[in-house]
Every structure is written in structure tokens, then in C-alpha cells.
Image (cartoon, rainbow, N blue to C red):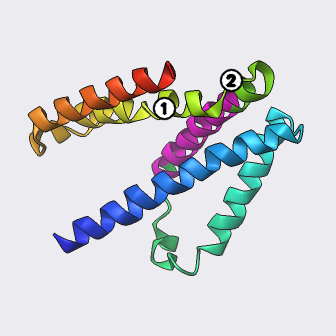
Amino acid sequence: MFSNNLGIIIGGLAPAFLFGVFAILTKASTQYNLGSSFFIIIVGIACVILGLGTIPIFADNLGKLSVMGIFFAGLGGLAWGLGMLLVNVAIAKFNTPISLLAPIYNMNTLVSILLGLWIFAEWKSISMPKLMLGSFLITLGGVILSKA
């Protein structure tokens, strides 16, 4: 159970903080007239540097490259990059407040939940009533925050 809790901190709470900071830095970059295309390029370069820098830490995966793993990672990068590009465009071109955008685009959790239940059959190992309640609260929170 301790390992699961540590995983929630490492893969849940820390990224939540970092993604929140990322949203603020995205808005800050638009205030300095960095175009949306260059925004994605700079973020991509930063990701490459981070990836190269962490190779020694995660060296156990070096020999485990697969074509399908690379394919899905690439598709994931395209999906994330396009999503972040669109957030940047909404901020830069339409002056949409990040405080209104973030709750809406973070409802991506619901997409992940539905796809995880369907594609990976995770419905077999989770509490559906708790999942439904949590999904409802996420949706309710997103709607309330988007109308702030």
C-alpha cells in the first residue's frame, strides 16, 4: 500500500502542481509575445533536454525500445502538443483567462477515465460508485469554475 501512496504523490500530486505552474508559465510566455508555434517548439526542446538528462536515472529501460511503444508515445506527444498549442492560441489570440481555461481543459480526466475503463478494462478493478461520484464532482467543479 505504501508503494501505491508514493505512486500517487509522484504521479499525481507533483504533476498536478507542475501542470498548474505550466499553465501560468504558458500565459506568461504569451504576455512576452512568444508566438504559439515557437511556444510549442521551446516546450519541445525543454522536453528533449529533460528526457536526455533523465536517461542515467531510468537507464533500465534503454534496451526496451519497441516500435509500438515509440508509436504510442509519439501519438501522445502529438495529442498533448496540439492541446497545449490550442490553449496557447486561446490565451494569445482570444485573451481567454487561464483561470477559466484550466478547469475546463483539466476535465481531460474524464476522457482518461472513460478510455481507461474501455481500452484497458479497468472497470474490473475499481469501485464504479466512487468513480461515478468523483466524475460528477469533477464535471460540477469544471462547470462552476468556468462560469466564475
| Cα–Cα gap, marks 1 and 2 | 13 Å
Task: Report if residue 34 lies within the magenta region.
Answer: no
Using a 10 Å C-alpha cutoff, classify the residue at mark 2 as few (fewer than 14 neighbours), some (14 to 19) or many (20 or more).
some
**Element assignment for label 2:** loop
Q: Which residue is situated farthest in the right direction here?
A: 33
Q: Which mark is drawn over residue 103?
A: 1
Is residue 123 toward the left or the right of residue 29 in the image? left
Return the residue nearer the eye: 77 or 12.
12
Q: Which residue is situated farthest in the front direction here?
A: 148
Q: Residue at x 18, y 31 (%)?
A: 133
Q: Residue at x 24, y 30 (%)?
A: 118
Is residue 98 toward the left or the right of residue 130 in the image? right
Provide residue 119's location: percent of width, then percent of height.
28, 34
Using a 10 Å C-alpha cutoff, classify the residue at mark 1 as few (fewer than 14 neighbours), some (14 to 19) or many (20 or more).
some
Give the residue type that dot 2 points to: Thr
Return the residue nearer the eye: 145 or 117.
145
Return the residue nearer the eye: 140 or 16.
140
Return the residue nearer the eye: 25 or 77.
25
Task: Report if residue 82 lies within the magenta region.
Answer: yes
User: Which sits earlier in the primary sequence, circle 1 or circle 2?
Assistant: 2
Q: Which residue is situated farthest in the bottom direction here?
A: 56
**Element assignment for label 1:** helix
Is residue 73 toward the left or the right of residue 132 in the image? right
Q: Quadrant of residue 86?
A: top right
Bounds of the magenta span?
68-87
Check the image and report above or below for 45 versus 7.
above
Is residue 33 toward the left or the right of residue 39 in the image? right
Q: Residue at x 73, y 58 (%)?
A: 46
Residue position marked by numbered label 2 in the rendering: 96
Give the residue type that dot 1 points to: Pro
